[in-house]
Image: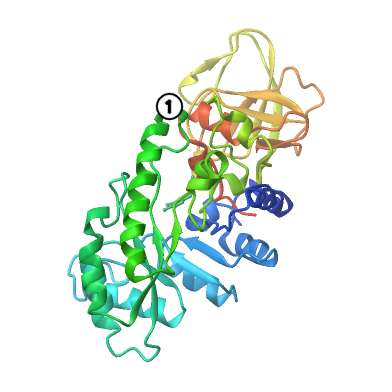
Amino acid sequence: MKTLCRIRIHLDNLLHNLDFLRASGKPLMPVIKADAYGHGLLAVAAALSSQGVDHFAVGAAAEGVELRRAGIRGTVVALLGLSPLDAGNPTAPPTLPTFDEDARAALTHDITPLIHDWSALDRMAELTRDHAAKSVPIALKCDTGMARLGFLPEDMPLVLDRLARAPQLRPDLLVSHLAAADEPEQDAFTHEQTRAFREAARCLRRTFPDIRLSLGNSACLLAFPEQAGDLARPGFALYGGNPFHGTRRDVLGLGLAPVMEAFAPILEVHPLRAGQSLGYGRAFVAPRDMLAAVAGIGYADGFRRMPGAQMSVNGMRAPVIGRVAMQMTCLDVTGIPSVRPGDMAHVLGGKARPIRIEEVAAWWGTIPYEVTCLLGRIGR
Ligand SMILES: *Cc1c(COP(=O)(O)O)cnc(C)c1O
């Protein structure tokens, strides 16, 4: 590791959140895409697996392969689907898998491919025509209002026609994703998506009565568990984020515990006289005599170059002053006279008034999901 900042992952809190979400009574397919939202794919999967979790949703198929190589068992669904690339695509770098490579990796490692368009359905049918197992599990993605990936509910009769000609393909899961379940004022849209999803499910179940349904994300699972389907897909809440932070449903997520802590040592502490400037562009000028500290983290570490953030130092809040630099950020520690080089400045977490993901998101003008994804790239 070539930086001075670190993150710490509290797997005990992850398991607390798992229990909290399991109290809904719904079976879960935790979402561990994007390196488990920055928390570490394998550590998170192993911890969940030790508690009996046997369904996982990853991003690219390659993430699923990594799970298998680490010995994780159960159903693994790759939410990005299979690579759309044809062999011999002249514009694609050789490190990007082709459809066939991705599909073969999925077959070899028993990863359930998410099929979301006609081309993938036809190519998967073609590729598995002589498949020895005679039963290749797939997940079907239905677009009920996100307008991103998926077949439309009214496409389902045609999907059934195609599947009738590819009896080796066995749709195990019907998946759809909610666009605004974390915004109570958009409940009507969420309920409409649920209705469309059920309509698609009814059609498929005439031919595939055992197909399982997966709709709900964290917000849906907390607010409308009965709409989540047979397998809920929480991501954010598992990592301790409250999808309803700042809304009238805030209370639903208050039992969740944050999983990621991020911190950096203080490199130097020095006085700053009234009128003295600090940092690039002299953007900060001390309004009075102050004490400044320099923390060893900056925008190269994913700490965004935005004014207004705070860190937690020795249990007290220290506002960021001046411009965030590449690997250093300055703090006003005037009220924290005990502070010394080597003390930890917490970007997330901390002793007395731990810094919450949602606070950082507000300072950065983004959503909390981005906070753990960015800071998750820091070393352990
Ligand atoms: C990321 C993702 C989820 C998880 O959503 P959260 O809001 O983190 O619970 C579920 N389903 C799909 C398809 C996703 O991409």
Which quarter of the picture shows residue 204? bottom left
**Is there any visible trace of residue 367 in the rendered image?**
yes
Q: Residue at x 55, y 40 (%)?
A: 327
**Horizontal relation, residue 359 to residue 182: left or right:** right
Position of the C terminus, as image quadrant, is: bottom right
* Residue situated in front as seen by the camera: 92 or 9: 9
Coloring applied to the structure: rainbow
> Residue 82: x, y in percent?
33, 67
> Residue 35: x, y in percent?
52, 57
> Residue 120: x, y in percent?
25, 69
Residue tagged by mark 1?
185
54 is higher (above) or lower (below) than 129 = above
Position of the N terminus, as image quadrant, is: bottom right
Q: Secondary structure at mark 1?
A: helix
* Residue situated in front as seen by the camera: 20 or 370: 20
Q: Residue at x 47, y 32 (%)?
A: 305
* Residue situated in front as seen by the camera: 161 or 370: 161
**Horizontal relation, residue 332 to residue 74: left or right:** right
Total count of labels: 1
